[in-house]
Amino acid sequence: MYRVLVADAIKPEGLTPLLQASNIELVQKTVDECTEELQLMDAILVRSATKVTEDLMEKMPNLKIIARAGVGVDNIDVPAATKRGIVVVNAPDGNTISTAEHTFAMMAALMRHIPQAYASLKVQKEWKRNAFSGTELNGKTLGIVGMGRIGSEIAKRAKAFGMSVLVFDPFLTSERAKKMNVTALSLDDLIEKADIITVHTPLTKETRGLLNKARLLKAKKGVYLINCARGGIIDEDDLYELIVEGHVAGAALDVFVEEPAVHNKLLELDQVIATPHLGASTKEAQLNVASQVAQEVLLFLNGNPVSNSINLPAISKELFEKIQPFYHLVKQLGSIASQCMKEGIHEISVTYAGSTLDFDTSILTKSLLSGFFNSRIDIAVNEVNALLVAKERGITIGEKISQNTFGYANAISLTVKGDNRIFEIKGTYIENYGPRVVSLNGFNIDFNPEGNLLYIQHTDRPGVIGRVGKILGDHDVNIATMQVGRKQAGGEAIMILSFDKPLCDEVYKILNELDDTTFTYRISL
């Protein structure tokens, strides 16, 4: 018999899988109400109210799985759970349809001035038909920034409304775009051509302020913007300014940088319609997420695999200690490859050699994929759903073993094939020294895959390194470490620099424009 604590309010319909199981005892109480019973609980199911902290986990020695009935896991200390071998699951796609529908409802309401007309008639008791003349969606060009599950659902609905669909997603393959009957463009081209732009990306360092004044000034005058994804993807100050100036005709916002957003100045503008973060707030979505995680808890407690784990699958403490260094290394290798391959990907293959073969390498491959995908798509990718995510995107995954360790005790080699090029990286873990990258695109190199890095490929000529150093020095950027590599004198060469803080856009742009530089990539680990 397993005991499951439901610590937040969830309707019985969402708990049906657990209520019907003969080997599950369900306890519906808050954490404070069952202090003495905490040590007996095998699982805990929460929404957003209960904070599952390391301290709470210490009070629950039998805890095996934490389930979040929702998308995010901000209220759960995932590293602490992983350290204890506790699996954390959520429902990443439970609100896909509700968010897509809400986005479309906001789009229609924005174009037809429905909230303004409602307020005029219902509140002001006015009948002003001419004041709220709107614009049809039919025949308009919709630009979708981010083609994950939600973006894909919106594209389907836009087609049904007679709209042309342009998409920007640097990781969308041309083959998948063709299958979805959408036109893939660069972000700048999409902004220039779209009548309406909606964003559906995760909020990362790269996407924060993605739609700012500089970019939006390239858009048609009278463009409409929609954000039902994450607050901060559209720069709020710039948006306010562009609406006041008349360049942006209006905006529909469900999310904000700071919430509750009751004092946000954007709400003062008649051209802005807004809702209080309702994207996932439907009866169906709430029921879906509860049912999904209830089923996940039941599967896991009965010894079956789960499909939406945020962290490592439950493994023995001894195995976790052995695998942890390599687990961290492959995730970093995957992240580096992802940040340097900003294009559609067709194949990812990894080769293991040496002491990495002492245990099941499939765990490492899934960790590598989670590192590769997590900054690219709009859902959390983990070691359990990584292969499914790759399959959904038509990416072939290969895993090989080799006897060639390149002189190290162990070696992990990663090859990523994209639409236009191939990226290769090799790494190793050295006892008492840590993880190292020892080869990059055929160049021998040696650096620690951590922190803020800059990867520059250039022509091997005198003065190139000096010019890079001077530019950084002139802009008061301190180089923490620097590694260089080349294949032959006068040919192609690379340098890897690390900094104490991220390199700003201005300096990065200057370095990109240097003569003899083939390309540069900022990497954040």
Image: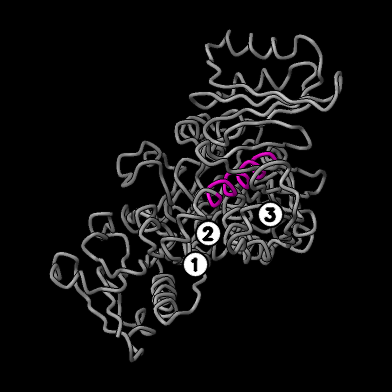
Residue indicated by mark 3: 352
Q: Kindly identify which residue carries mark 1.
A: 308
Residue type (three-letter) at the residue carrying disc 1: Asn
Residue type at mark 2 is Asn
Q: Report the quarter where the C terminus lies.
A: top right
Q: Residue 28: x, y in percent?
A: 22, 76
Q: Position of residue 95 (x, y in %)?
A: 47, 66
Question: In the rendered view, does 73 fall on the left or right side of 400?
Answer: left
Q: Secondary structure at mark 1?
A: loop
In magenta segment, residue 339: yes
Q: Quadrant of residue 453?
A: top right
Give the vertical position of 18 relative to 341 (above or below).
below
- In the image shown, does 340 or 432 lie closer to the viewer? 432
Please provide percent x and percent y for residue 66: 35, 66
Give how far apart the Cα atoms at labels 2 and 1 are: 8 Å
Q: Which residues are magenta?
A: 326-340
Q: Are marks 2 and 1 in contact (CB under 8 Å)?
A: yes
Within 10 angstroms of label 3, few (less than 14), some, or many (20 or more) residues? Answer: many
Residue at left offset 49%, top offset 73%: 306
Distance Cα–Cα, label 3 vs label 1: 26 Å
Q: Kindly report the distance in space between the C-alpha atoms of the residues bearing marks 2 and 3.
A: 20 Å
Instruction: Please say if the residues under marks 2 and 3 sit with CB atoms less than 8 Å apart.
Output: no
Q: Earlier in the sequence, mark 2 or mark 1?
A: 1
